[in-house]
Structures are given as C-alpha cells and as structure tokens.
Image: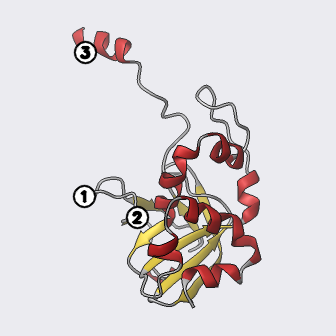
Amino acid sequence: MTIGEVLDAIPQASMWKELLKDAGLNNILLADPKAQATVIVPVDASFSDPINGKPMWNESTIGELIINSPDIINSLAGASVWKGLWPSDSLGTGMQIPTSNTVDKVNPLNVQLKDGKLIQSQGSAARILQSDIVACGPSIIHIVDAILLPFRFDDGPKDAVRDTQAIGK
C-alpha cells in the first residue's frame, strides 16, 4: 500500500494527509508506490492544539494558523517528511534527522527522545502514539500527538533598524 493508502486506513490522520496534498506531495509521496521516506503524521486533534504566536499571529490554534497563513504549509509538511528510513528503534537522543526542509545539512531535525517516545523539533515536541507502520517503497509512518513545528513562535522577525544600530555601536 502507498503512504496515502495507509493514511486512508487511519481515521485520525485525514487532516495531515490533506495538508501533505496541499503542500504538493501527493504524486511524489502519497501516491508513489516507490516513495522511500519516514513520515511523521500528527493526529487530527493536534490541529486544535493551542498556540501563542503573538505578536506575529493572532490565531489561537495551529489549525487556525494553517488556514490564515497557508504559506507555512510547506514548512510544516517538510518537517514531517524525513529522508531515509527511521524505524523507532533507530532513533536516539541527540540525533540530527534530515527532513525535506533540510538544505545542504542546514536545519536538520534535532531528535531528543525521552522514554523512546518523544520527538523534539525546533518549536514543539510530539509523543509517538503508534510507530513503525510500513508502507510500500519501503516507507515508515509514525503517528504522533502533535504537529512538529520547524520554527519557534518567539523567533519573530528581526528589527533591521535596531540590529543595524547595535552593529554600529
């Protein structure tokens, strides 16, 4: 079964499958029987997780943020698609996992495992609920309880004027 077919069989994964489609990953990931990747799939309930994105964003949940700022969809999807096969027993604390967002080894996902079940990303953590679901290709799917954020909300845009003044001092 393709990754998309496996996700169709997991009722709580439907919203993430749609997000992956919105990111343009249908043909190269979801429907490709030769896709080889590890996919981290947050459950639908994670779209209702509260966020505090102020002052940049007024949304109160990650789902609202996705709807109102669709430009973050590719970044969120990219953080959940890991290059290579990463079964749960291969994950260890301190590992750096290359994701689809990783460019020339920049911004890999730093994995910090606690009890072998918690994945820490740059802006959030997710607990593995169901691991090592196999799809064709081969590919591996891990179902998690939260969306891995490849950014932190407190990493707001830099104030160019203030930063220039600080450099000049």
Q: Amino acid at mark 1?
A: Asp
Task: Please tell me in which quadrant of the rendered image residue 114 appears.
Answer: bottom right
Q: Secondary structure at mark 2?
A: loop
Q: Amino acid at mark 3?
A: Ile
Task: Please tell me in which quadrant of the rendered image residue 46 appears.
Answer: bottom right
Residue drawn where x is 73% and y is 45% of the image: 50
Quarter that holds the N terminus: bottom right
Residue bearing the label numbered 3: 167
How far separated are the C-alphas under marks 3 and 2?
34 Å
For the residue pair 150 and 6, the one nearer the viewer reads as 6
Instruction: Mark 3 and mark 1 in contact? Answer it, CB < 8 Å.
Output: no
How far separated are the C-alphas under marks 3 and 1?
29 Å
Residue bearing the label numbered 2: 99
Q: Position of residue 128 (x, y in %)?
A: 63, 72
Q: Amino acid at mark 2?
A: Thr
Residue drawn where x is 36% and y is 18% of the image: 160
Label 1 vs 2, first from the N-terminus:
2
Residue drawn where x is 63% and y is 32% of the image: 57
For the residue pair 109 and 32, the one nearer the viewer reads as 32
Residue 91 appears in the rendering: no
Q: Position of residue 8 (x, y in %)?
A: 69, 80
Decide if residue 94 is on the left or right side of residue 116. Answer: left
Q: Is residue 85 above or below residue 113?
A: below
Q: Is residue 74 above or below residue 131?
A: above
Q: Is residue 105 above or below residue 163?
A: below
Classed neighbour count for the residue bearing mark 1: other residues with Cα under 10 Å, few (<14), some (14–19), many (≥20):
few
Q: Which mark is residue 104?
A: 1
Decide if residue 133 is on the left or right side of residue 49. Answer: left
